[in-house]
Image (cartoon, grey):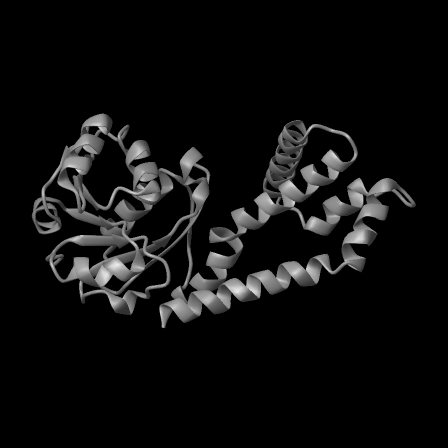
Amino acid sequence: MKIGFIGNGNMANAIITRLRTHKHFDLYVSGIDFAEVSAYAAELEITAIDGNSALAAEVDVVVLAVKPNIVPLVLAEIDVKDKLLITIAAGLSLSSYPDSAVVRVMPNLNARIARAVSAIVANGFVDEAQLAVAKEIVSSIGSVYEIPEKDFSTFTAIAGSSPAFVFEFIDAMSRAALSHGMPKALATEIAANAVAGSAELLAFEHANPWDLINQVSSPGGTTVAGSRALHENGFYNTVMQAIDAVIERDQELGS
């Protein structure tokens, strides 16, 4: 099966890098600067095609990996009839695309290490075989959740934008450790590993977060003191407001 990528940004690069090991996929790429795309394709040992229209004509699946404001320009020059179109452009609903087989995907930054959390939704023109192909492509960079399109803005907040919030949380902890004399680089590494392990434990045990919080918290202990400070300073409310802000902005962009 031939899969073509329009755009070679970070997310396209993450997917292409993982799909190179799938022997039943032939990968192609096009972009604005053919010389740049050719060098990129040579490095990854895939095929560069000069022009988005030519790429769409050549492949079975078109992966649209461009910024949302570029999408209408690309759609105006390609023919996706009888093709599967996979789009990773943020904020644009399925109704923004032609009346053909379209799958909308929202991945996140962790695709770089094949630990992305991606949402996927298909329009009514997508058959089961095409959806299976789309899921195989997206699962190459991590876990995939098929959700209703109405929940995409919420997904964007808790999965797409949340890595930035987690990085801020880790940085805040390492800065606090720095103020107590620990080297910041070491503190950042320790905090990052603690957060990663905690997330894996929660996912592995399918636990309620509060069950695990209670297991860490001894009566009158250090964790309780820290949790109390978080609550007194509006930790929960701040996080919830951040999620609300992302959802509101995503819906603004979509309209």
Seen in the picture, residue 80 relative to 166 is either above or below; the reply is below
x and y percentages locating residue 220 in the rendered image: 92, 45
Left or right for 152, reference 190: left
Residue drawn at (81%, 47%), measured in percent from left and top? 226
Residue 151 visible? The answer is no
Q: Quadrant of the N terminus?
A: top left
Quadrant for residue 222, please give it.
Answer: top right
Please name whichever residue, 29 or 134, is drawn nearer the observer in this view of the structure. 29
Residue drawn at (18%, 61%), measured in percent from left and top? 73
x and y percentages locating residue 211 in the rendered image: 74, 48
Q: Quadrant of the C terminus?
A: bottom left
Left or right for 220, reference 229: right
Residue drawn at (45%, 63%), measured in percent from left and top? 153
Total tally of numbered discs in the picture:
0
Seen in the picture, residue 213 relative to 140 is either above or below; the reply is below
Residue at the bottom extreme, as displayed: 255
x and y percentages locating residue 140 in the rendered image: 35, 38
Quadrant for residue 111, please give it.
Answer: top left
x and y percentages locating residue 147 in the rendered image: 42, 59
Seen in the picture, residue 166 relative to 231 is either above or below; the reply is above
Please name whichever residue, 62 or 209, is drawn nearer the observer in this view of the structure. 62
Residue 53 visible? The answer is yes
Left or right for 3, reference 168: left
